Image (spheres, rainbow, N blue to C red):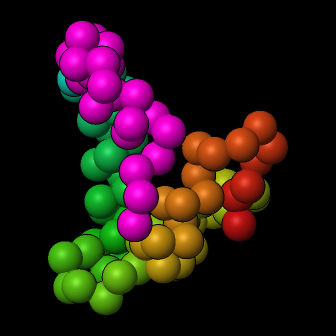
Amino acid sequence: MGKSKSAKYYAANPDAREKKNAYNKEYHSTDKRKSYRAGLNRANRKAGTYGNGDGKDMSHTKSGKLVKESQSANRSRNGHGKKSRLK
């Protein structure tokens, strides 16, 4: 499988990668992000998919509910494109 455009960019620009990693480290260590992550982990545990290797994630729907969905489908869709692509 080939590298994405952004992966190629960061491989060619180590200073940019360093800057991005510094931002991500700060962003993902905020209380708001920790709380969000903890909530998703809690939902995964409750659904019985956390750490059992079944390839499932909890996915947000347009109505705000959480449903089981394959990790690959959930992670490939979210955060890409201009329109909301929630299930």
**The N terminus lies in which quarter of the figure?**
bottom left
Outermost residue, right side: 83
The residue segment tinted magenta is 1-22
For residue 51, what is the image quadrant? bottom left
Instruction: Name the residue rendered at 39%, 36% in the picture.
Output: 8
Specify whether 76 is left or right of 39.
Answer: right
Specify whether 48 is left or right of 76.
Answer: left
- Magenta stretch contains residue 20: yes
Instruction: Name the residue rendered at 59%, 52% in the picture.
Output: 78
Looking at the image, is 60 positioned above or below residue 7?
Answer: below
Instruction: Name the residue rendered at 40%, 28% in the picture.
Output: 9
**Residue 85 shows in the view:** yes
Q: Main secondary structure of the magenta part?
A: helix
**Residue 30 shows in the view:** no
Specify whether 38 is left or right of 83.
Answer: left
Residue 63 placement (x, y as % from top left): 75, 58
For residue 34, what is the image quadrant? top left
